[in-house]
Image: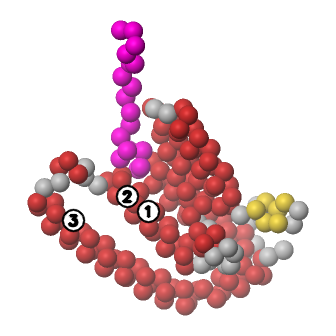
Amino acid sequence: MKGKEPHLHRETAHKLARFALFAFLLTFILSRVFVFLIMSKLMPNLYCFVQGTHVHHLNYGIFLLATVAGYSVFRRPTGRAAEVNALLYGVAMGLTFDEFGMWLHLGGSYWQRASVDAVIVVTALFGLVAFAQTFKRFERHHFWLSFVVLLAVLGFGAVIYIAGNRLGEMVGQPLRELESASSP
């Protein structure tokens, strides 16, 4: 069959999104834990400094995002390579969005609320791609179910926002003080 490409089995977006979601959340959690442990001096300082400038981990994420995107475009991975690529994409997104507040405001404290809010939004988007029903099977009863889920998500978002503000009032200043005390 000359001229006809062999059929390649492609992973579904849902499966790859679950890999990316897992890696994204794990990277975010580990990043926060490591930064806290380093700032508390409970772990050696693993930060990278170049001529006195702290290279934040969002930079590693940006370079990894560029690499993953290039690989995806030029190699079009399938099988295990696509799964590894999705995991690396999640890691890159976790490293980058963990410091979202710092690149949004071009500096400031690591503990900015904007970073956590961005991680919640990205997690929700990954979750939608990973677990949502396809639109081909979207029927009338799905509309009402989606409406109820939307109301629940909005309610949950309000609770998270209020709780986040309260938590920020309680621990925000001590975290900023910890950060400034750990600066070289």
Q: Are marks 2 and 1 in contact (CB under 8 Å)?
A: yes
Q: Which mark is residue 127?
A: 2
| Disc 1: which residue | 123
Q: CA distance from mark 3 to mark 2?
A: 14 Å
Which amino acid lies under the numbered mark 1 shown in the image of this protein? Thr
Asked if the residue under mark 3 is in contact with the one under mark 1, i.e. CB atoms within 8 Å, the reply is no
What secondary structure characterizes most of the magenta part? Answer: loop
Classify residue 4 by image quadrant. top left
Left or right: where does residue 23 sit relative to residue 99? left
Q: Nearer the viewer, residue 103 or 19?
A: 103
Q: Which residue is mark 3?
A: 146
Q: Residue furthest top?
A: 1
- Residue at 56 percent across and 34 percent down: it is 74
Q: Is residue 78 above or below residue 13?
A: above
Residue 179 picture location, percent across and down:
72, 79
In magenta, the rendered stretch is: 1-18
Q: Say which amino acid is labelled 3.
A: Ser
Report the residue at 71% width, 64% height from top.
Answer: 56
